[in-house]
Amino acid sequence: MILDSKLVEQARSTDMLAFLEKRRGFTFARRGSVYRCHQHPSFAIKEDRLSWYWHSQGIGGHGAVDFLVKVEKRSFRDAVEAVADTPVTILNSGEPPPGRRLVLPEKAGFLQARLYNYLCKQRGIDTGIVASLLNEGRIYEDRRGNVVFVGFDDHGQARFASLRGTYGEQKFRMDCVGSDKQYGFCMDGSPSGLLYVFESPIDAMSHASLENNLVGDRNAWRRDNRLSLAGTSDAALSQYLKTHSQIRELVLCLDNDSAGREAAVSVDRKYTGLGYVARLELPQGKDYNDDLAVLRGVKRQEKSKQNHIYQEAR
């Protein structure tokens, strides 16, 4: 089996910084002769925008293809296809190339007990919101006891999924293989022209719970729309606005830390320039789940562990 050499060379020479920002939602800042990743401070790309090293994981390489092979454990062919963003042409073979697809973990049984315990008891999110999102298929518990958050395209096809562990204090979080961060987890309400934007699904759900409490109505959260970016990249926001033309006002509710504030200001300027009404509404604590925890009297002790290698999930 021989891959099209021109396509392979194209994939290998792809700007790695641009690829990771668009397709993985990573953001970077120039620090001397390297670009440091905001989400993973020990991950750096050199000024050639190809050579990289992830110090905490003890691995490095050259280019986005190498990254997908070593970090996400993809096959070389699948990595080339993902970076080139086109089906790989196979020479001298009658086998058609398989399309890239999202790999969703298998669902648990009917009870979803760990999901409810984690989201409602440990995180303080309203049970009614959790039940509604379960019924819509936007969240579910997998067979390992993780919570799965799913993002769909405008045809109802799952295109993105992230996991959050529910065991112990050192919980991991990761994106499922094949996830496309242009399709974020969202909580669509009525045909409102207002969209709240968050970094994570849990923050979106927490904000919805706070809204219910403020108004005194368990369905108040449905009056507007909420979107998770799965980070600070605006890829999911850009895609969402393409298919939701009624949205004219953006409320940026990103994390109240340096990365979140910087991203919120950048997004505000960009979309104000595009004709949207945008404003910042940062949480009092680090994020909106911190604010909800204060309201509920829940003590948050969780330390998240980033893990983007699906095979290592528990």
Image: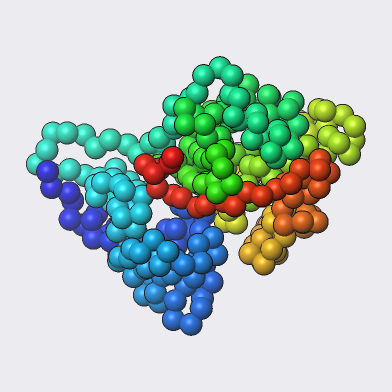
Residue at 73% over, 41% down: 206
Residue at 59% over, 29% down: 114
- Count of marks placed on residues: 0
Residue at 56% over, 42% down: 168
What is the quadrant of the N terminus in the image? top left
Image location (x, y in percent) of residue 173: 52, 46
Quarter of the rendering containing residue 281: bottom right
Examine the rendering and report whether any part of residue 187 can be seen: no
Residue farthest along the left direction in this orientation = 92
Examine the rendering and report whether any part of residue 221 can be seen: yes
Residue at 58% over, 24% down: 112
Residue 242 relative to residue 10: left or right? right
Question: Does residue 73 sit above or below 26 in this rendering?
Answer: above
Image location (x, y in percent) of residue 161: 50, 38
Quarter of the rendering containing residue 283: bottom right
Residue farthest along the top direction in this orientation = 110
Question: Does residue 108 sit above or below 89 in this rendering?
Answer: above
Residue 295 relative to residue 230: left or right? right
Residue farthest along the front direction in this orientation = 168
Question: Does residue 91 sit above or below 266 in this rendering?
Answer: above
Of the pair 151 and 97, the residue shown nearer to us: 151
Image location (x, y in percent) of residue 135: 63, 21
What is the quadrant of the C terminus in the image? top left
Residue 262 relative to residue 184: left or right? right
